[in-house]
Image: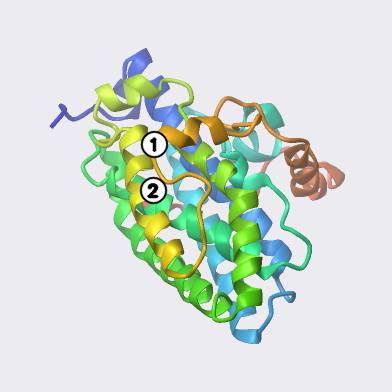
Amino acid sequence: MSAQLAGPDELGDAERAAVESLLRRLADDELVLAERYTEWQVRAPTLESDLAISNIAQDELGHARLWYDLLQDFGYTEAELIFERDPADFRHSTLVERPFETGDWADAIVRGYFYDVAEELRLEALEDTSYPRIADRVAKILSEENYHREHAQNWLERLTSDDEGVERVQAAVDRLFPYALTLFEAGDASEDIDELGIRTESLDSMREQWLDITVPFLASLGVDVPAESEDDVDELLPEHIGRDGNHTDDWADLHDDMTRTYRDLGRTEAHRIMPDPDNE
């Protein structure tokens, strides 16, 4: 196990850069996915699913809040981290920014499944992190993400109960799988994140585990995955990765929508709508 890192005020430059890089990926993924999920409110196929997707969106926003709060340890404000930040500075995976296929519930469920399996692996790799401020938040988030994954799996089983449903899920998998691979792409300071023990599993290791989980499960439902091994995945990566700031045009549109009210009201600071996690 790597040596425990100091608190935020005592980190060296390389240590701080590694912690910040990881936190931005964690927070940005959750924020942008939550923004996309809100598009399904009152549009989901049943009242039950409408309530569920609304709760999941709220959970993801809460998780983003937990990670952005740790970035505020370094002197950033919430406005700087979200509303006044250049879209190119965000480091989320392009999986979470892509618009949903219009009216296709299978798209939301497949996307959620791919993300939730990856998120569970990512959180487990943070349980023994060398940065205690991260470890303090993992258990709460992991318990909620387990529910999200269960929700997605249950819906996948329901959707693939007939041939038409299998076709819809297959189309969503074909469309989203390359973008899901970007969840495991490296960003700034990735080597330092591993070497410092901030994360205890490498991205390559987590991607392999992700394939070992998602491929057999989807196959059991009659759905094929475009890549079944590590040898196939690199060829399938899309042009826009996200982790490096290279986003699709869809992100610019979503960011504009997300920040419009803040700009239209002439705000200069964000008003906290959730309690400080350290005071709970």
Numbered tag placed on residue 211 in the rendering: 2
Which amino acid type is marked by label 2? Leu
Name the side, left or right, on which 2 lies relative to 115: left
* Tag 1 residue: 230
* Depth check, front residue: 274 or 211: 211
- The residue furthest right is 264
Question: Separation of disc 1 and disc 2 at Cα?
Answer: 8 Å
Residue at (65, 27) in percent of width and height: 246
The C terminus: image quadrant? bottom left
Residue at (15, 27) in percent of width and height: 3
Q: Where is residue 260 in the image (x, y as percent from the top left)?
A: 82, 46
Which amino acid type is marked by label 1? Glu
Q: Where is residue 83 in the image (x, y as percent from the top left)?
A: 69, 39
Name the side, left or right, on which 35 lies relative to 131: right
Q: SS for tag 1?
A: helix
Q: SS for tag 2?
A: helix
Q: Position of residue 223 (x, y in %)?
A: 52, 63
* Depth check, front residue: 88 or 239: 239
Residue at (31, 32) in percent of width and height: 202
Residue at (29, 57) in percent of width and height: 139
Name the side, left or right, on which 104 lies relative to 22: right
Image quadrant where residue 178 sits:
top right
Numbered tag placed on residue 275 in the rendering: none
Q: Does the CB distance between marks 1 and 2 fall below 8 Å?
A: yes
Mark 2 is surrounded, within 10 Å at the Cα level, by few (under 14), some (14 to 19) or many (20 or more) other residues, namely many
